[in-house]
Amino acid sequence: MPSPTPSASYAPATFRIRLILLKGVLRRMLLNLFARRYVRDSLARRLGSCARCGVCCHLVANKCSALRLDAHGGSSCALYTVYRLPNCRTFPIDPRDLADRNLVAPDVACGYHWDGNR
């Protein structure tokens, strides 16, 4: 799995992709607010662990301002111990979120998956 470099920036290529990503952000927000059981059940079936690639932090605008990249290409959140939005705490909720993420960086694998979706 290629890891990002400290200067990695994943910018959506087209306006259409930006609209898809915005739709995904809104979808995750609504799921976290109104479909908590679905989120909880889906997260219970999720396998793997965070690869600290930071790609999910590029799904809104160009890059979350709390994203920090270290010299070895790993990432961390400056707000992790303070407060993380529900969208950040639960990402990815389901395989649809991984599809959104892969629009931004298809060559960088996410550490999470579901059975049959790798």
Image (cartoon, rainbow, N blue to C red):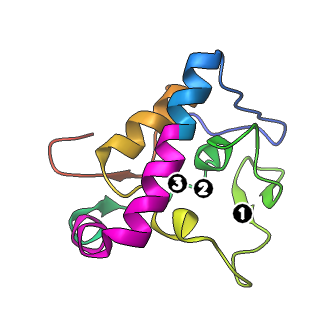
| Gap in angstroms between the C-alphas marked 2 and 1 | 7 Å
- Which residue lies at the image location 53% right of the left edge and 71% below the top edge? 86
Left or right of 73, for residue 48: left
Left or right of 15, for residue 45: left
Q: Position of residue 104 (x, y in %)?
A: 58, 29
- In terms of sequence position, does the residue under pointer 2 or pointer 1 come before the other? 2
Quarter that holds the C terminus: top left
| Gap in angstroms between the C-alphas marked 1 and 3 | 11 Å
Q: Position of residue 110 (x, y in %)?
A: 46, 45
The residue indicated by pointer 3 is 51
Q: Amino acid at mark 1?
A: Ser
Q: Amino acid at mark 2?
A: Arg
How many dots with numbers? 3
The residue indicated by pointer 2 is 52
- Which residue lies at the image location 23% right of the left edge and 52% below the top edge? 114
Q: Amino acid at mark 3?
A: Ala
* Magenta-drawn segment: 23-42
Helix, strand or loop under label 3: loop
- Name which quarter of the figure residue 22 lies in: top right
Residue 37 drawn above or below residue 87? below
**Residue nearest the viewer, comparing 97 with 51:** 97
Helix, strand or loop under label 2: loop
Label 3 Cα crowd, 10 Å radius (few <14 / some 14-19 / many 20+): some
| Gap in angstroms between the C-alphas marked 2 and 3 | 4 Å
Residue 67 drawn above or below residue 83? above
The residue indicated by pointer 1 is 76
Q: Main secondary structure of the magenta part?
A: helix
